[in-house]
Image: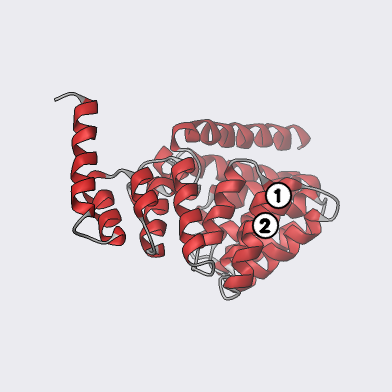
Amino acid sequence: MKRWQNFLLVIIVVVFISVYTSRDSLALLVWQEYHLPQMAVLLDGNNAELAMSMGGYYFNSVNGGGEYNVEVAEKAYEKAVSINPGILWGHYQLARIHFVKGDFAGALEEINKELEANPENLRSLYIRGLIYGYRNEVGDLEKAEADFRRFTEWAPSEWAGYNDLAWVLLKEGKYADTEIELKRAFENISEGNMNPWLWNARGVAELNLRKYSRATNSFKRAKELAEKLTLEDWRRSYPGNNPATSGEGFSAFRRAIDENLRRAESKR
């Protein structure tokens, strides 16, 4: 049977079942049995949780085992918040989608909605810090720094918060502050010594503070650890990014460490 005939058969089955079941049940059937997200979102009447599940399948494909399609994920999350505007993670995930699409204004609007609806979800501060850090309008770096500082206080054992706080501090030229925050990271994170991102950031701070020997050692450690990373490790560190293009970022990270190491060694 041809593909279009299979699809037509599914449509007939859906229409037939709709006579005997609710829209919520039908949407669940379409999603679970046929994985037709557009139709499931259309049929979904009042099941915000189902819409969130569909969004997760199409956005967090690396960790969730699904596919990657931000357009479908966005429609699903929009459906979820239209049913329940205060649903946990709804506006948060929409903010992340706008962010990866480069729509910083939309991302900021959505993450502020998440913080308003769910002020206990301080993981939103990390996303807002990224938005401010990349948008980089007047005053944004200070706002990003404040959000990342609050996030690291809330989640002191998560390396990403320190890494991106360091990234913002380096952009601000606050090299001594960067060194202090990374010292906190290594103290608070049990696996911190095995993290190439933290070692690379530490090396950049040391390089700018003219601590060339220490910077060289930090970059060597970063290089050693980065060479042990797999592409899957990289993808897990950047959920929400397109897996198909993750190799480019992975290679760029390794090249940046090599270049940083060359710069540090040339100063010794």
In the picture, measured across the screen, residue 40 lies left or right of residue 116, that is left
Q: Residue at x 73, y 33 (%)?
A: 263
Q: Residue at x 60, y 47 (%)?
A: 98
Q: Position of residue 112 (x, y in %)?
A: 66, 63
Could you say which is closer to the camera, residue 75 or residue 109?
Answer: 75
Residue tagged by mark 2? 109
In the picture, measured across the screen, residue 172 lies left or right of residue 253, that is right
The extreme bottom residue here reads 120
Q: Residues within 10 Å of mark 2 (few under 14, many from 20)?
A: some
The three-letter amino acid code for the residue at tag 1 is Ala
Is 98 placed above or below 265 here?
below
Residue tagged by mark 1? 105
Quadrant of the drawing holding the C terminus? top right
Colouring scheme applied when the structure was drawn: secondary structure
**Element type where label 2 sits in the image:** helix
Can you see residue 214? Answer: no
The three-letter amino acid code for the residue at tag 2 is Glu
Could you say which is closer to the camera, residue 190 or residue 108?
Answer: 108
Q: Residue at x 56, y 60 (%)?
A: 91
Q: Residues within 10 Å of mark 1 (few under 14, many from 20)?
A: some
The extreme top residue here reads 2
